[in-house]
């Protein structure tokens, strides 16, 4: 048996993390709110 996969269409989702301030170079930030929204 040789199964085949066909993909019709696609999905584009953005992952948005809300933070209190923008990070400086090399800094990692923690967030408590993450959303997945449709991308454009």
Image: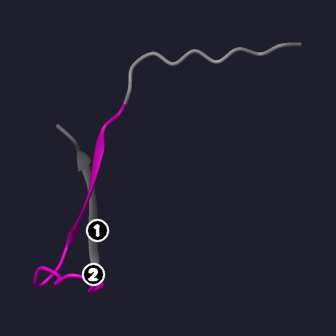
Q: Residues within 10 Å of mark 2 (few under 14, many from 20)?
A: few
Q: How is the image coloured?
A: one colour
Query: In the displayed structure, would residue 13 be above or below residue 31?
Result: above
Query: In the displayed structure, would residue 30 be above or below residue 37?
Result: below
Element under disc 1: strand
Which one is in front, 28 or 7?
A: 28
Task: Kindly identify which residue carries mark 1.
Answer: 34
Give the quarter of the figure containing the C terminus. top left
* Occupied quadrant, residue 8: top left
Prevailing SS of the magenta stretch:
loop
Percent from the top left, x then y, of residue 28? Answer: 30, 84
Outermost residue on the left side: it is 21
Outermost residue on the right side: it is 1
Distance in Å between CA atoms under marks 2 and 1: 7 Å
Per the image, is 24 magenta? yes
- Residue drawn at x 77%, y 16% as measured from the top left: 3
């Amino acid at each position: 048996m040789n199964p085949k996969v066909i993909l019709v269409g696609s999905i584009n989702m953005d992952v948005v993390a809300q933070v209190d301030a923008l990070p400086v170079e090399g800094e990692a930030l923690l967030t408590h709110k993450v959303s997945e929204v449709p991308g454009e």
